[in-house]
Amino acid sequence: KPTPGEESLSPPRRSTLRAFATGHTGTASAAANVCVDVLGRVLLEVLARRAELGASLLRPGEGLLAGQSGLGHAALSFAKSTAGKGFRGVQGAAARAGAGGKVLGEINDETEEQMRMRTSIGVARAAANFNDLEVVAEYTKRLEGNFLKEIDAGYPRGHDTEQLRMCIKGLGGVVESFSNASERAIERLVSTMLPRVRQIVNEAVGNEGGSAIPAASFMGSPVLSGATSTVSSTRLDYDLDDRAFELAQLSEGYVGRMCSSLDELIEPLGAHFLPKLSDALLIGILGGVSTRLEAAIRKSKFTPLGAISLDSDVRYLMNFAKDRLDSPELKSNVTLCKACLPLARLNQISLLLNVDDLEDVLDLISVSKRKGNWDLKLDDAKTLLSLRVDFEGSKVNDLLQMDDE
């Protein structure tokens, strides 16, 4: 079944081709201008609003995606707050996306499996609102090419024909407008999801606001212990001795648990988004995760073994991303870091904290800057190196007394 975006493209295409068939350049130029205006102004505005509404409907915990309290509560809350309010038009269609047209009494009687199915359909429809922007951009690009071929085949060379050609090339600007609108829509969706993402990271690393985890655990993961566990709050910690480091190798670690929660959040959308949009969403989410992890890392102390553990955790996060990204261009660490600057900073922090000796720091920074993949300022480097328990703060300051380029 054609999407609303595809259905909206058909009338301007047919009317423009009919104008072309007259062989009159003035008529064809006028029709082309109308086509550009309809697509680039009217349809763009409608689809952008649909995508904006889709982002609000996908807000975790309040819409169709699971929040901290789980999917069932989120879906029921969505049904009560929007599906029964009688919205009309585009808003009504989107609001009823998760409700399937049911009244609230019927929703309350649903089984958990029925609610999951209804919610999944709602997520698919909301995702289609984002996909439409990309579909229309691609269709408009092809439409421009087809119109130009029609001109080459049916009109003689001359000033009037060149004017007609310029009118058709206005569709190139329309393609760019739809692509920009698509990018803004994904950015808006990422913004609505970031509060839940921050909760997930906080819960994994044990920051304030996170859930309590067993005290008989290491780095947020259960380990074998003969003693009875008591529940308390723990924090991310890389101040590891030999025994703690060995335990870290046996446990899943906070990053594994965090990535599992991220999967639960993102997977429903990834199944319905176009690959390009799915990648953009994941990159945006990774940015939020990396920023929050950097803040948590700055609160920890590091032994050399702790730095090695951090390197392993950063690699785990990057592999998690690469396994789920569709674009081959994002499958390498270099291109992934260029696409996600907060993740690049996290990788640089890991490299910095893993130097064997302070004398190696300047070489690391110099070589990385020449390669164009170093964003940490000297003040950041000083602060981070001071987290290493085996590096003296005075020696760190003396070493990095240079101009910040």
Image (cartoon, rainbow, N blue to C red):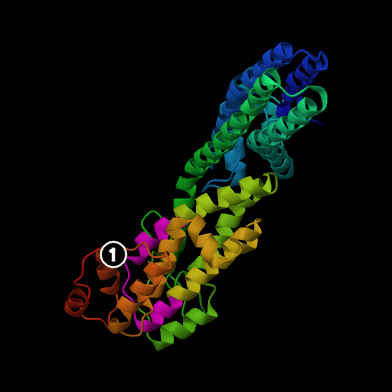
- Quadrant housing residue 387: bottom left
Q: Nearer the viewer, residue 175 or 91?
A: 175
Write down the quadrant of residue 104 in the picture: top right
The span picked out in magenta is 289-309
Q: Which amino acid does label 1 sit on?
A: Asp
Position of residue 98 in the picture relative to residue 370 (left or right): right
The front one of 144 and 377 is 144
Residue 223 seen from this side: yes
Is 184 placed left or right of 390 in the picture? right
In the rendered image, residue 371, in percent from the top left (x then y), is placed at 43, 68
Q: Nearer the viewer, residue 81 or 11?
A: 11
Identify the image quadrant of the N terminus.
top right
Q: In which quarter of the image is the C terminus?
A: bottom left
Circle 1 Cα neighbour tier, 10 Å, few/some/many (<14 / 14–19 / ≥20): few
The single residue placed furthest to the bottom in the displayed view is 242
For the residue labelled by badge 1, is the local secondary structure a helix, a strand or a loop? helix
Residue 218 visible (yes or no):
no
Residue 343, percent across and down?
Answer: 46, 60
Instruction: Judge whether 324 appears above or below 243 on screen.
Output: above
